[in-house]
Image (cartoon, rainbow, N blue to C red):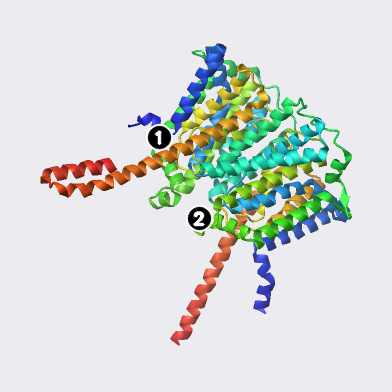
Amino acid sequence: MNDRIRVLLAPLARWEGALVVVLAVEILVFGALNPRFLDPTRLIGSTSDFLYLGIIALPLAIVMMTGGIDISIGSIVSLSAIVTGVLFANGTNIWLACVGGLAAALLAGLVNGGAILLTGANPMVITLGTQFLFAGLAVGISGLANVSSFEGISGLPDGFVEIGNGKTFGLPNMLLIFGVAAVVFTVLLHGTSFGRQARLIGANPRAAVYSGFSVGRITLTGYLLTALGAGVAGLLLTSYLASARADIGSSVLMPVLTLVVIGGVSMFGGEGTIGGVVIAAFVIGFLQQGLRFAGMTESQVAVATGTALVAVASLRWWTSHAAERFKNQRARRRRALLADVAAS
Amino acid sequence: MRVPAFLRAREAVTIIGALLFLLVVGLVQSRFVEVGNLVRMANSAVILALLAAGVALVIITRNIDVSVGSTMALTGILGGLMLRDGVPAALTVLAVVAAGAALGAINGVGVTYGHVPSIVMTLGTLGAYRGISFIITGGHSVENIPASYKRIGTLEVLGMPVLVWTALALLVALMLVMARTRTGRHIYATGDNATGAHLIGVRTNGMVVLAFTASGTLAAVAALVFLAQIGSVSNQAGMGIEMRAIAAAVIGGVALSGGVGSILGATFGAVFITTVTSSLSFLGIPGFWADTVIGAILLAALFADSRVRAGLERRRRAARYRTDEVPGDEPVEPPPAAAVAESTRVTSGGAS
């Protein structure tokens, strides 16, 4: 009996399980507060408001698993958006302009990864520098092209705007793109040697060096993928808002980091799953949607999200600490029992 | 080829760089180095310097604080509202500083006793503090600060604004605390090797809370400066300045790996960033390139730092191999006992 309960509860003991429970409770609570929240079309439609963050969080999770971090993601989002917009405004075909935007993002990723490998400096410092560099470049490019910094470049073609706002097979495109990305990154991290090597770099850098694969190549790939994710998110956001602006990514960094951390990826590398990040994207997204639906203002939502972030991070340590103590106690008890049996 | 001690310090690069930069821009545009303009730049560097000093303290304990911008906005709004409603300035200053200390202490307690990684903790409070300041004001900015308070911003002593003097005094006091007192050394020890510091009796958790509290307090002081200089405060105040403050500390030689760096360096980093951004208009470069320039300088500093450190490491290793050969040469000519004692004393002295 006891064993059966333990088998049933085992997945919950994992972080991803706890997140699923939180997600279910969250949807039920907000549904009880306001039944309209549970309307499936509305619930699914609202995912477009936050899933672009998840598209950056997935590759960033890989970088953080290698023990790195990328502070410059928001600036790369801006850069890819404004490069696309300026190319389009100067008469380039919109799809070609998108390729240009993604190329700019990949170049930014190359700069990040290259600088980290060349200097051996803390990734946080390097990407702090490139954060200024890329954000400055984005503003500079839009300044050179005489784009109004508040209005941005609008008048984008319908076909492009449709990507972020339209639906395919009855599901929002954003959700489908996120789904594809989630599958790709799950396979990449959990099913390939690349994923295992990335994890080893975070868990034990020295062992990774001695095990003979190219640590530099894996690290660089991580930053390139993150930049690509940020570039794609920049295009999606531009399409969703139907306007390309140089500061479009300025508020992306903090929410994305929140997603990755709540998803259970350790800041120190080597730990975490893509599944956790995927669930966290929905947990946080629906939390914010639900709070808004419950009549909270934008700033109250910000306070609630910040508090939840801190509370979850703290609880995560304390629950694992408590679980460890419980296990130790049980082991001690069992040993004392065995000693008693042996003595009698 | 010995390098003078003051040049070996990590801060030296920034300080020399900042002075060289002033010189170069001064050669291009002599108006840039006029006393009036230098004073103006010092005045505009005060806020960033205070924030950078606070962030540097936290980074030295091997943590990070990205919430200083939000702390500044929240305490500034608190102070602005108190002043507007006729609370005496002295009382307001006390309340604002206390509030800043409390907000910083929340970060510190979360990081130490809550076991939240510092970046997560301060990311959370970054959002939360900013949200609270929005809730307090309802999105409006706080205007109508009494003229008696705003006058502090224009008050000058010996040709420099009194705010610059105050900030300078505060920063020098902080430098002395960090360099000369037991508390300062304990903060360095916590960042350099937390476990080791704990084992020799340093209250590492206390030191981390102290550093965060100091950072919050300095952010509150920056808010008071902001109120006096600008004369109003909005919810957008200090948005994104946390990254500039961290950049200033890093340019000033504070290592994110903890235990290394100084308040002097962070202050000069802030002065350097302000100088560079305000020099752009003198050089005829549009202001929107400011961030690009800061980023490029930061990256250049990191590259230079990594080259220099690699070079030092090579030299250190080479020196070690040279000294290793010395014992092998000795037996050839057995020296008198007194000389042996003498030489071992010298070599041991040289190695330490």
Residue B91 visible in rendering: no
Quadrant in which the N terminus of chain B appears = top left
Give residue A183's position: percent from left, percent from top: 74, 58
The answer for how far apart the CA atoms under marks 2 and 1 are is: 38 Å
Whether discs 2 and 1 lie on one chain: the answer is no
Which residue in the structure is indicated by mark 2?
Answer: A209
| Residue B187, x across and y down, in percent | 44, 42
In front: label 2 or label 1: 2
Quarter occupied by residue B55:
top right
**Is the C terminus of chain B in the top left, top right, bottom left or bottom right quadrant?**
top left
Crowd tier of the residue under label 1, counting other residues whose Cα lies within 10 Å: few below 14, some 14–19, many 20 or above: some
Near-viewer residue (A258 or A220): A220
In the image, is A121 to the left or to the right of B148?
Answer: left
* SS for dot 2: helix
Res A95 → quadrant:
top right
Question: Callout 1, which amino acid?
Answer: Ala
- Residue ID for mark 1: B179
Tell me the tag on residue A9.
none
Q: Identify the residue at horizontal 58%, vertical 48% (top origin).
A: A68
User: The residue marked by circle 1 belongs to what chain?
Assistant: B
Q: Nearer the viewer, residue B6 or A319?
A: B6
Local secondary structure at mark 1: helix
Q: Which residue does the image show at 64% across and 56% down from the upper left?
A: A264
Point out residue A28 in the picture as x, y percentages from the top left corner: 80, 58
Q: What amino acid type should be assigned to the residue bearing mark 2? A: Val
Residue B78 in view: yes
B96 on left or right of A160: left
Task: Tell whether label 1 touches label 2 (CB within 8 Å).
Answer: no
Query: How far across and down, in percent of the image, does residue B292 sit?
Result: 63, 30
The disc numbered 2 marks a residue on which chain?
A: A
Residue plotted at (63% across, 30% down): B291
Q: Which residue occupies the extreme bottom position in the image? A: A344
